[in-house]
Image (cartoon, rainbow, N blue to C red):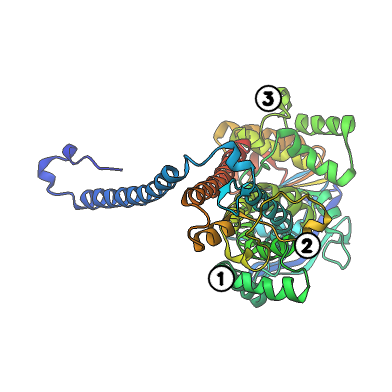
Amino acid sequence: MAVKLAHKPAEAGVDWEALVARRDALRLRKNALLTTLLVFTLLAVITYKGASTISWEFLTTPPREGMSAGGIGPMIRGSLLLMLGTFLLATPLGIFGGVCLAEYGDRSRIRRFMHASVAALAGTPPIVYGLFGLAIFVLKFQFGVSLLAGWCTLTLFSLPVIVLTTEAALKTVPEGIINGGLALGLSRWQTLWRLALPYAMPGIMTGVILSLGRAAGEAMPVLFTASIYYASTFPALSWESLRQPVANLPYYLAEGYRQPGVVPEHLIWGACLTLIVLVLLLNVGAIVIRTRARRRYL
Amino acid sequence: MIAAMTPTTTKTVIQTVDLSVAYNGKLALKAVNAQFYENTVTALIGPSGCGKSTLLRALNRLNDRIPDAVTQGKVLIDGKDIYARGVNLTRLRREVGMVFQKPNPFPMSIFENVALGPRLHYGLRGRALEEIVEDALRKAALWDEVKDDLKKKSGLALSGGQQQRLCLARMLAVQPRILLMDEPCSALNPISTQEIEELIVELGKQYTVIVVTHNLQQAARISQYTGFLM
């Protein structure tokens, strides 16, 4: 991006445009560097503090001695369970919502209102979802504090982002492809299902994974709806488990930190690192899906 | 508009009766009465913005997709008004195929591009489907160039001229009778243009072809009849 001023003949005077462009490029690079540096410092500190704790035993065994020793196996399993159910519930619902927003009633006031509402929901603080889940799923539907209530709450929490990314991804489908499908005599539904959705799928899946990553790291939505802190065993999985609370990483971090002296610091750092790596893996997965899909299309 | 100035004994396939199209209340096409003949190439020429493409898109009702488009008058295909109530759009567009100004292959393999239509419309699979794909690609003079990596290569990986012939093949695979082409060569280089033009002449022997062009020489080279819009 940097412009080489040396090649400008001297009599041309000062090339202000080039100077400004160079200044902007430098500023941009400086800011990018600063942000990256911050993130890496954060990662470095957490890795430094947490890496020594990580071991196979730490990742797979339950806590011992009243949470003061042992591993975080049940928390990891609980987080994975919460994410799996949320993925299965939120993906179809979110894509359906995005399709409705993108394809139907394009000019109507209702559509614009819906879009604005979903965008507002995407920015709603996680604690609001947690309280809503408590009021509706835990109490009203009598799911109790349970895996099921956690799935429902996290699904609501992830939905807006999935709906919006689906809508945005469908908007990027070239008009030529839609027209081509319709001109072949495909119905609107076939054009959507066979042409538009496959074209938009990499973008949609990126949105799904990113919103799952966000859901995986949030303690607030599961705080009142699904979480248990004291988990010293792996409870067997059955239909009954749906109605029982689960341990999970964000809640373990929040609660473990709040009770100083009970959970030793190195366990907290270890769990912190585990959660970050989990979310990072999800994000890397999203990038891989996107680049591979892009390559496939050309 | 005056279409088909030469009197003829050929059978009329399409007839428009006082066809008008307005976008957003602005008239794009005003009371067009035109006829298009069976197994004949008709070129539509005229200055840009005169409604050539609008007329073309009125013939397969692709204007329906534009929210503010209003169509009046009739388009008779074999004497039946395609704007009448209860007309099946899928059946209509199967009869009346279309290729666009910019080649628009689907982001899938060459085979899938051509196979999509017949598979969805006629439920073809296996051998029958492969035959229809080969036949369509041969008619579009593309078979020899793509037969080796039919199912591996993406339609988007072809050159511009090849992409346009792929779109022709895709259209032919659903067995239309009428072919609409909206400036099919305007995005192509001279060599590809010549190849497409030769194809149009060839297709004109078996299909009713209507080609929009802004090139008078091209109209002279490829068409038996020319409609002039202004």
Q: Is residue A164 left or right of residue A6?
A: right
Which quarter of the picture shows residue A219? bottom right
Q: Amino acid at mark 3?
A: Glu
The secondary element bearing badge 1 is classed as loop
The residue depicted at 80 percent of the width and 33 percent of the height is: B133
Along the line of sight, the residue nearer the viewer: B210 or B140? B140
Label 1, label 3: how far apart the Cα atoms are: 55 Å
Whether residue A225 is situated above or below residue A217 in the rendered picture: below
As drawn, the label of residue A243 is 2
Chain letter for mark 2: A
Q: Name the kind of residue labelled 1 in the image.
A: Thr
Q: Position of residue A265 (x, y in %)?
A: 47, 52
Mark 3 residue crowding within 10 angstroms, few (<14) / some (14–19) / many (20+):
few
Which residue occupies the foreground of this view, B164 or A207? A207
Q: Can you see residue B24? A: no
Residue assigned mark 1: A124
